[in-house]
Structures are given as structure tokens and as C-alpha cells.
Image (tube, rainbow, N blue to C red):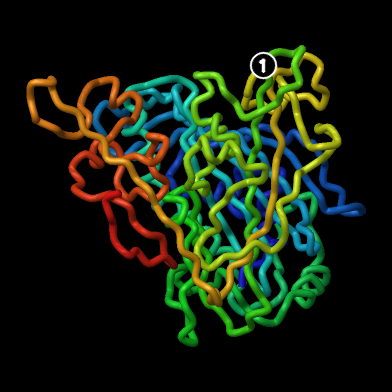
Amino acid sequence: ALSLPRLEDALLADDWALPGCLVWDYWRSHKVRDFTAEPWHWATPPDPSKSRTVSGTRKVSMVMPVPPQPMCPPETRVTVSYDVGLAHDEHGKDILHVKSSAVSHDVPYGDHFSVEEKIEMLREGDGVLVTKSWSADFVKRTFLRSMIVSSVKNSQKDTCDKLMDVLQSYADEDGSPLDSYFGSPLSRSPKDSEAALLDSDGEEFMSVEGDDSPFEDIDDGMEAAPSLLEFLGGALSTFTMSRWRRNSIHRACVEFEVWELQRRTTMFHDDWRAPFLPHDGQKQSRWVDERFQKHPSILMAMEKAAMENSPPIEAPAAMVPQDHWQVATDATTDKDGWQYATDFYKKSARWKAKATVGLCRKRLWRCSYVRLPKLVTPRTIVVQVWELQRRTTIFQSDWRAPFLPHDLMRHRFRWVDMDYNTHPWFKEEGTALASAEQPPVAAPVGWEAEGWVVA
């Protein structure tokens, strides 16, 4: 099975340009050249004599081949900024997270967006539960946005496959203590690794093993666990499942994070409420993801979501909350978890713990959800979708999907959610939504559709 300590050592190594380093092995599978890594910048340096909590950033650059596409060069320079952290969950288990932000400098409109990815690795039994999420973060407007997002989404399947292959190569097939280490500040002796393995549960739940396919059927006739990739419409992919034991006590846990946003009229007022200015856009929903977009797990309209006092998250199929929603507090927040700024900036350095002249504030909510083999009482939800059409003039009856340039710029396609945005369950994107005669919604694994009805 795959060992989390081995991944920690491979990821926290000083030299990332050598075989045996997780990042280099991953990019080498993409056939990059001229790979260079800048020194570590530690927020919490590794110290084997103390807590194993680690946090640091690092930047790498390379030249990467580009698949044949119109107007694209054969190669492009790529810069990737990494944020690596090692922490513990409420049960004392190690959680290794890797956040990355990649910018391609030579592709068309490459300076308009970055590809944000987040990978979390959590020890589960004798293996490792790995989740990966992604997003395309735009810093400039472009009429090719939907095309770029579609291209990034299509490339994620290949990147997940490559990541899976690299993780498979790190798996210790016979389950014996690891005997190779990569010189990271947290390297431990084989005896320490053996003790760590003995502390884990004997039952497997989700693991990466030598020759198993990550999508193979679950044995013992158990119901397949739903993929979060399908629930979030391609935003999140859990790709490490190999088998599900009948031990129902051993359950996978996924932590959801939701940001709450509020704005006040002026710095002399204290009337904090959901963002209300026209340019706030999806921030008006109050409950957003880390990109300040309406959270993909919120299926109600923005106006209704803004009235909720706790995150109105629709849990994925076959998952139930393990505890209540909690506000995250630390040294960078006030006693209620709020951070303040003059606008909704994405850079954390601009947010302070004191209100003073802040017109905007945000705070982070967390809740853990557990995936069960079966739910005793199935849930029912109603998915509502608007169909939009436009005609040429009031004297004609040529109704069809919105076709004016500003319709496409504002993503006013034929099928939209209650806020005129793309529904997170849509299986089509962009102009492909115009040709669908029924809402192109693909029910995630674990949900059963009963059919569409015109209200």
C-alpha cells in the first residue's frame, strides 16, 4: 500500500530536480525540460524534534510541450507556485496538502488565467486517500473564457492519470517498511516507519496499491461510492478508491470549506450583510469557494442562499455531516473568525483582523462529511433550471438560444441555473448548451433522476 510518510519525504525534499522527488517525477511524466526549482520559503520550518506541522512555498519553472492546437506554439514556458503543508485532522491523522498555481507564458491569453489545483492526502488504514480539485482562475477578461475552461477541464483527465501513475510507483507492494528515503527534513528511520505502519488500522478502505485500477469495481457486492468529480461537475475528483471493506465503522472523511462574505455601506456603518453592489456578481450569494464564486455545492438561488446564517451546502450522495459547521479562527482573524479589507481581494496579505476602515469581511467555515456504504433514508432534491431563448425582432417568431455577443460574454446560454449561471451538474459547456433540447444535467453517481417537468 502507499505510505504517507514516504510521500512526505518525497515532497519535502530540498532538491526537486532529482528522481525520487514527487514533483519532479510528476512533471517528468509530462516530458518537460529545463526544470528548475527555487529555494524553499518556510512559514513553519520542518523540525523532527517537535510537531510535524509544516508549511512552506516554492516556485518551479520549466518548458512544457503543448498538444497541437490552433494558434498554439509547440512548447511553452510554465511557472508553477506551490504551497505545501503538513497538518493533522481532529483524529490526529496526518494530512498532506499541495496547492499549486500554474501559468503558461507562451500560449494565447496565457497571462489572462492560471490553473489552480489542490491535492490532499490523508492516511486511511494501510493506504492513502487522495483527493484532487482544480479551477481556472481568470485575472483578465477574455471572450475565449469558456473555450479555455473547457480545454483545461479536458486536460485534467490526463493529469489525474499521470498523477495516479506516479503515486502507484511509490506504493510498497508487499506492505513492508520502506527502505528508501529522499533526504527531506522529515526523513525517519525504517524502524520509525514500521511503527507508523503498525499504528494504522488493519482494514483497508481506500488505498493505492501496486497493480489495482483506481476505478475498479468494489468487491463484496457493496454499492459503489459516488465520485465527487461527478457531484461537483468536474471540480473535484476522488480517484484513489480500490476497494470497500464491510467494516462500516471505517469511513472516509472529507472536509468541506466555505467562505462567508459580507459588506457594509460605509466605514461609519455597522450594517454588515451579504455583498450587494452590482459588481459583486456571484459574491452576492454570500457563501462562496476560495475563488469567491458561488460554492458549487449550493444549488439554491443566490438571493435565497444570502439569507442563510450557516452554509447551505447540499451534501454529496451517500455522505452525511460528521459534525456541525464551525468557524475557523486563528491569529489572523478576530474572535468571531472575521478578516477585514477594503474590497474582496484574493491575496490573503491584504486581509487584517481589525475592522478599522474595512468595508468588506470574510470568514471560513468548515464541516466534515463522511461517506457511508448506504444511506438508511434516501434524500430527495429538486434541481431547477431555466431555459432562455431570444428572437430576432418582435415581428418574428424565430425563437432560439441567446445569440447576441453580449449573451455569450455574460454566459447567457440556453440552459442556466436560477442565477443565470452554469449549473454545476451540467455535462455540456459553452455553445454546446444551445443545441440540447432538454436540460443537459448528468445526475451524479448515487442520485437517480425521475425526469424533467416544465413548471
Question: Can the viewer see residue 229?
Answer: yes
Task: Name the residue nearer the viewer: 184 or 223.
Answer: 223
Q: Residues within 10 Å of mark 1 (few under 14, many from 20)?
A: some
Q: Report x, y in % for residue 156.
A: 42, 48
Q: Amino acid at mark 1?
A: Thr
Which residue is at the far front?
455
Name the residue carrying label 1: 265
Give residue 403's quadrant in the image.
top left
Which residue is at the far right?
49
**On screen, residue 106 above or below 3:** above
Q: Report x, y in % for residue 339.
A: 75, 29
Residue that appears at 9% across and 29% down: 397
Disc 1 secondary structure class: loop
**On screen, residue 384 above or below 409:** below
Residue that appears at 70% across and 18% down: 359
- Quadrant location of the N terminus in the rendered image: bottom right
Residue that appears at 83% across and 23% down: 354
Question: Can the viewer see residue 36?
Answer: no
**On screen, residue 288 above or below 381:** above
Q: Is residue 160 left or right of residue 82?
A: left
Q: Report x, y in % for residue 179.
A: 71, 69
Task: Name the residue nearer the viewer: 396 or 131.
Answer: 396
Residue that appears at 82% across and 68% down: 192
